[in-house]
Image: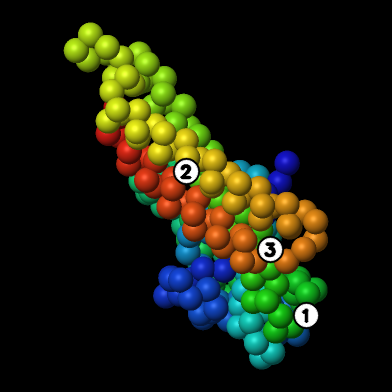
Amino acid sequence: RRLAAFGLTEPDGGSDAGATSTRAVRDGAEWAVDGAKTFITNSGTDITSLVTVTARTTDGVSAIVIPADTQGLTIEAPYRKMGWHASDTHGLVFEDCRVPAENLLGEPGRGFAQFLSTLDDGRVAIAALAVGLIAGCLDECVRYANERTAFGRPIGSYQAIAFKCADMATSLETARLATYHAAGLRDAGRPYKREAAIAKLHATEAAVTAAREATQVF
């Protein structure tokens, strides 16, 4: 098994995905890449084999494939995050990082456009992860509410707790339906950019609310 990383976000970019300062200069039969990326998923695992990065070239922003063991590529220590620890996330630094000219992915100057299409897939995946988080919160809350007793009754029998579980169940269904709808359009080869964005927005916000409410049940 091998993993590949997707290097788009930069330290000064934030939500502006197109803010690319990393540069790639053609030097004979090689590209020399200099710059930095941040919050790059799957970039430091034992089975990560390569990272595809956006870099500014003379033709615009291009996509270049860089093997993980390339000299000049530094994989920084993993970020200390509050959650989602299963997601391996690092910063990457490129210092005169050289790869063969054929490592250019697709057409020169089309790298950002290529990455945008990948982001739509990612939005559906993030929505699906959020749906799983909501489901986990709901399952644990229902289990605990049936086990924990207060004043001689399971706390789930009190409306203050039951309403929280009901809201989670409602959010779970709507988030799941939005995610399935976006994924179904994608699998059918139909446009799904808008639906992917809707699914990600709704599911992630619902997941944050579910996690917050779950702490109140416990």
Quadrant into which the C terminus falls: top left
Indicate which disc, 3 or 2, sits on the residue closer to the N terminus. Answer: 2
Tag 2 secondary structure: helix
Q: Nearer the viewer, mark 2 or mark 1?
A: 2
Residue 155 visible to an observer of this rendering: yes
Instruction: Answer with mark 1 or mark 3, whichever residue precedes in sequence.
Output: 1
Image coords of residue 5 (percent x, y)? 62, 57
Residue farthest to the left? 151
- At label 1, counting other C-alpha atoms closer than 10 Å, the crowd grade (few under 14, some 14-19, many 20 or more) is few
Q: Are marks 1 and 3 in contact (CB under 8 Å)?
A: no
Does label 2 or label 1 sit earlier along the sequence? 1
Q: Pointer 3: what residue?
A: 192
Outermost residue, front side: 159
Q: Amino acid at mark 3?
A: Tyr
Q: Is residue 42 visible?
A: no
Q: Secondary structure at mark 3?
A: loop
Q: CA distance from mark 1 to mark 3?
A: 24 Å
**Residue 107 - label:** 1
Say which amino acid is labelled 1: Glu
- When the figure is inspected, residue 85 is found, relative to residue 183, above or below; the finding is above
Residue 58: image x %, image y %? 66, 91
Q: Secondary structure at mark 1?
A: loop
What amino acid does circle 2 point to?
Answer: Ser
Residue for badge 2: 171
Q: Nearer the viewer, mark 1 or mark 3?
A: 3
- Where is residue 6, by image quadrant? bottom right
Relative to 157, say whether 105 is above or below: below
